[in-house]
């Protein structure tokens, strides 16, 4: 097994160290993580300046490859020339807080996993349901158990023949998360974000902070929000195709020019 691990909270975040420790023994692990916290950067790639990579010891032992860019940059540069091989699996996280519903469109954690998926590598993104790293070691053990079960199920072998998969996993912050039920879910929806927060800088200019995420709007049974609220592990298979296939015919009748 050759595994690439990334995150969006930065290379010093406790979540990625916990995930790396939990995955030890699975095979060869390489870590490529952002130099700084890059939460909310989605699938952004850095195209206006060069990227650099340096190695840093985390927990005084393992060398992490630190990239001065986004989570997608980390996986992209690793897969397109730095690693020199195609890994068997890309893991991202463990994120400090949930990535459910609309969060997945903004999440750097999901984006790092998605970058692997786009390059044909099976990928899993891991997040905790609440911020603060509560019961992180239990979450890491639960993440390892999911990886073990994915491998044992033959999913990696099927992916070589049928194409990669992309899973988004949200783990409730509780000490018994490893024994909680797992539910395969769909994405819920949130209300619109709270209003921007307006402040004034020391020079008297107006500055704005993006407001916090809104509450869950669609959180019924079967959604990721519902599963985590029930204390279960949510596993959501994702895809990249954003096409509204059901609306194509209607728009073709309105807008498509005759051949």
Image (cartoon, rainbow, N blue to C red):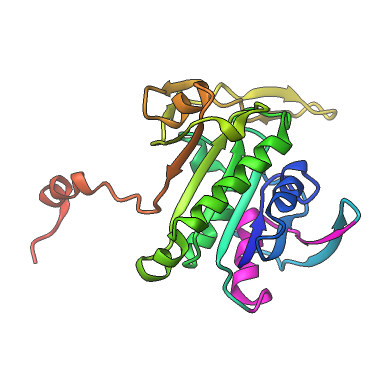
Above or below for 240 versus 177: below
Q: Which of 20/14 is in front?
A: 20
Q: Nearer the viewer, residue 213 or 101?
A: 101
Q: Locate residue 74 relative to residue 202 in the image: left or right.
A: left
Residue at point 54% right, 24% down?
231
Left/right placement of residue 194 relative to residue 183 reads right
Residue 241 percent across, percent down from the top left: 35, 53
| 78 in the magenta segment | yes
Q: Quadrant of the N terminus?
A: bottom right
Q: In the image, which residues are magenta?
A: 61-84
Magenta-span inclusion, residue 74: yes
| Image quadrant where residue 47 sits | bottom right
Q: Tell me: residue 144, above or below residue 121.
A: above
Name the foreground residue: 180 vs 217. 180
Note whether 114 is above or below 193 in the view shown. Answer: below
Q: Quadrant of residue 53?
A: bottom right
- 14 left or right, relative to 98: right
Q: Is residue 40 visible?
A: no
Q: Where in the figure is residue 30, as x and y percent of width and height?
A: 71, 64
Q: Position of residue 58 (x, y in %)?
A: 85, 53
Residue at figure coordinates x 51%, y 58% from the top left: 151
């Amino acid at each position: 097994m050759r595994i690439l691990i990334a995150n969006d909270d930065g290379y010093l975040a406790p979540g990625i160290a916990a995930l790396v420790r939990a995955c030890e023994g699975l095979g060869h692990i390489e870590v490529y993580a952002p130099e700084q916290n890059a939460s909310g950067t989605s699938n952004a790639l850095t195209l206006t300046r060069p990227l650099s990579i340096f190695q840093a010891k985390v927990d005084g032992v393992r060398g992490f490859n630190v990239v001065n860019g986004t989570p997608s940059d980390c996986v992209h540069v690793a897969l397109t020339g730095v690693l020199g091989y195609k890994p068997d699996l890309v893991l991202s996280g463990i994120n400090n807080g949930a990535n459910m519903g609309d969060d997945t469109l903004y999440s750097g954690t999901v984006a790092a996993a998605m970058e692997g998926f786009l390059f044909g590598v099976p990928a899993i993104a891991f997040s905790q349901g609440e911020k603060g790293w509560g019961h992180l070691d239990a979450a890491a053990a639960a993440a390892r158990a999911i990886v073990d079960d994915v491998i044992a199920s033959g999913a990696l072998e099927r992916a070589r023949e049928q194409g990669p998969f992309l899973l988004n996993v949200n783990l409730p912050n509780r000490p018994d998360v490893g024994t909680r039920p797992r539910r395969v879910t769909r994405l819920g929806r949130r209300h619109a974000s709270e209003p921007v927060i307006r402040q004034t800088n020391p020079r008297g200019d107006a500055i704005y902070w993006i407001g916090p995420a809104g509450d869950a709007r669609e959180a019924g049974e079967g959604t990721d929000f519902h599963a985590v609220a029930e204390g279960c592990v949510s596993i959501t298979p994702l895809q990249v195709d954003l096409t509204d296939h059901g609306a194509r015919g209607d728009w073709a009748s309105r807008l498509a020019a005759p051949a």
